[in-house]
Image (cartoon, grey):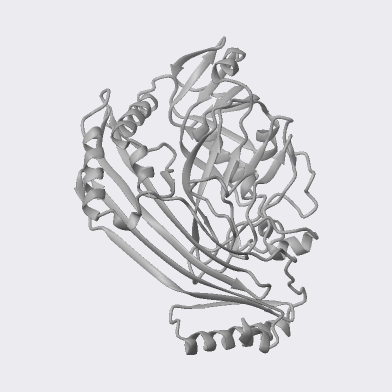
Amino acid sequence: MDQAQRRGCEYAEARYQRTSGLSCLARNGVPEPAEMVEAEGIGVRLIYDGALAFGATNQTSNENVSDLVETIVRNAKVAASVIKDKIHFSIEDTHVEKWGTEEKKKVENVSVESVISLLKDVDKTIAKPISDVSFPNRMVFAGHDVEEKVYVNTDGSRLESRVPRVYFASILTALYEGKPTTASVPPGFSSLGGSGGWEIIEQLDLTNFVPKTATEITNGIKAKGKPPVSETLDVILGPNVAGLTSHESCGHPGEADRILGREGAQAGESFLKADSLGMEIGSSEAYVSDDPTIPHSMGFYLYDDEGVRARKRQLITAGKFTEFLQNRASAYYFGIKSNGSSRAVQFDREPIIRMGNTYIEPGDWTFEEMLKEVKRGVYIKSFMEWNIDDKRLNQRYVGLEAYMIENGTLKDTIKDPVFEITTPKYWGSIDARARDLEYTCGTCGKGDPMQGAPVFFGAPHIRLRNVRVGSR
């Protein structure tokens, strides 16, 4: 930091980051070679005359780090001579703190043999057919990552952190009447887990959870009923489906770097504009938040990678966009404080605006109460496929386990209902939110080079009125 300031930089920050992890896979009960990864180094970012530059090294001697700073300063000086729009950071509070997540069983003490043993036990529970549905190809995964950081900046912040994360996921090929279907536990190609020690995996009780969920998946695979050809009716979405929509059609378009065009070539754009704050996007029942401070969540952090303290962000409130996800540069542009949304997944990745844990807020209804008021509709409990466009405006979901609703009662299962809708129509059609908020884990991809950030997405059951449902 001293060197950068001596060279004329108005701001500088350095982040030592060490990431280590273990990933185990069993295919049809046979373990593959375990993968153990470790990366550590220092990333440096600085501003010289309004030009922002970043560089990193895994050679952490004083001489190498000094050379790195000189290289970044030279790059920033060249950029400063040609850029038109100068970059400034918002003024933020300084913090000196050590923080992390609680862990009872350190993941470093978990042996490869014990993880493989768990995967074999889980595989046994789904090796035999379930209701005439067999799973001839089964891949089950489990592992952990540890993220350790020391962060300093020229504002005076110094932060040290340790966040271990654990996860489980599976990909299954289900076979019924000679037709294969790719599914996963949990459904939707997401995962289970969170931040903390190995006790989180033990609490999931996977040898009971996985076969129970696989049995639910067979309901969708065996469905004989057909969805409406193209009909306007009411739809109830399960937390598995609705949680993904909070991430894809609210969290991503609400990232300020997308809105300002900075991420256009790297991760996509947004249908929102810089003046869209306060814009009505949905009904009075549309509430979406992002909160990285949720204990033991996959997207947990207390300070972001610009030294800003994290907090809950209320993205949509009563149908209006009330907050974008901001870093210090975008916050300066909007004339506000950063809300702590800047993250980097490794030492050699630049911090960019990311979600933490994005979810639809729970309401006051029960699932039974919502169901009772539907005369004709569809209940999509889980999904098997989804698509969304570059600007997060048009989206499509194909149901896995789904049912017709008639006069407030669940009827026959239906095969592959297609729910296709625009983002404003989606948020504008919500009229009820249940109390049963659920989370699943995911890896959110963004940036170039790619940064896969751990996140939660969540929702309760929600009901939408008068929307179209069709079939493949």
Left or right: 31, with 267 as reference point: left
User: Which of these two is toward me, 403 or 78?
Assistant: 78
Q: Is residue 347 above or below residue 364?
A: below
- Quadrant occupied by the N terminus: bottom right
Q: In the image, what residue occupies the spot 72% across and 82% down?
A: 80
> Residue 287: where, in percent of width, then height?
67, 36
Left or right: 149, with 140 as reference point: right
Is residue 318 among the parts visible in the rendering? yes
Please identify the residue farthest to the top as the structure is shown.
407
> Residue 168: where, in percent of width, then height?
36, 45
Q: Is residue 330 above or below residue 455?
A: below
Left or right: 330, with 177 as reference point: right
Q: In the image, what residue occupies the spot 67% across and 35% down?
A: 427
User: Which of these two is toward me, 288 or 404?
Assistant: 288
User: Which of these two is toward me, 395 or 212?
Assistant: 212
Is residue 231 among the parts visible in the rendering? no
Please identify the residue farthest to the left as the structure is shown.
30
> Residue 110: where, in percent of width, then height?
28, 53
Q: In the image, what residue occupies the spot 58% across and 24% down?
A: 235
